[in-house]
Amino acid sequence: MNKYVFIAVVFCAFACERGTEEECLADPIVTEADLSSGATYDSLYAEKLGADEYGMHEYVIAFLKVGPNRDQPEEEQKELQRAHLDNIGRMADDGSLVLAGPFSKEGDLKGIYIFDVKTIEEAQELTRTDPAIEAGRLVMELHPWYGTAALMEVSEIHRRIAKIKI
């Protein structure tokens, strides 16, 4: 164990409410990696992101799949794609869509959405706003998902790093 990790472990042993170094490290919430990362808990930031005590958040994940109606003329396909992308931007701007993107391989699975909603029903309402779904070009498969609350920052980070806006 390097000296910095050792110092952090010893500090934890004194600071940990459960007492000994062994008890702190036995607690799955406090690990050697946590102690050596230098990260500190920020309750205000966690609250802003809607994080629970594990730093996690409930979402609904959507898999966009090939729909039954894929035979639109090429110009209509382009219009649907533009409207689909505009809808993604609108949902990201209003905060209901945390993450979206296509899969890079050909096949039936076309993309993914992660919605900041608690129920499948709420996600269904949002998917009904997608012109590509309305046209039957895509269908959604929705699942409750529990992931890091840090995803709530992805849209803002993306805005800062994308030279070309979609």
Image (tube, grey):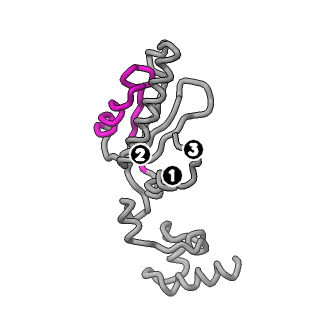
CA gap between label 2 and label 1 equals 11 Å
Instruction: Name the residue type under label 1.
Output: Arg
CA gap between label 2 and label 3 equals 16 Å
Give the structural element (helix, strand or loop) at label 1: helix
Question: Which percent across, then down, holds residue 155?
Answer: 47, 51
Farthest-out residue, right: 2
Instruction: Name the residue type under label 2.
Output: Ala
Residue that carries the numbered disc 2 in the rendered image: 92
Instruction: Name the residue type under label 3.
Output: Ile
Above or below: residue 81 compared with residue 39:
above
How many C-alpha atoms fall within 10 Å of the one at disc 3: few (<14), some, or many (≥20)?
few
Question: Which percent across, then down, holds residue 144?
Answer: 38, 42
Q: Residue at x 59, y 48 (%)?
A: 163
The residue mark sitting in front, 2 or 1, is: 1
Q: Residue at x 36, y 65 (%)?
A: 47
Tag of residue 159: 1
Does residue 79 appear to the left or right of 130 in the view shown?
right
Q: Counting residues from the N terminus, which is met first, the one under dot 2 or under dot 3?
A: 2
Residue that carries the numbered disc 3 in the rendered image: 164
Q: Residue at x 43, y 62 (%)?
A: 55
Which stretch is magenta? 121-146
Does residue 123 appear to the left or right of 54 in the view shown?
left
Comparing 7 with 28, the one in front is 7
Tag of residue 86: none
Above or below: residue 49 compared with residue 65:
below
Give the structural element (helix, strand or loop) at label 2: helix
Q: How many marks?
A: 3
Question: Which percent across, then down, holds residue 52?
Answer: 37, 61
Let me know if residue 140 is in the magenta part.
yes
Q: Counting residues from the N terminus, which is met first, the one under dot 2 or under dot 1?
A: 2
Comparing 32 with 151, the one in front is 151
Give the quadrant of residue 11.
bottom right
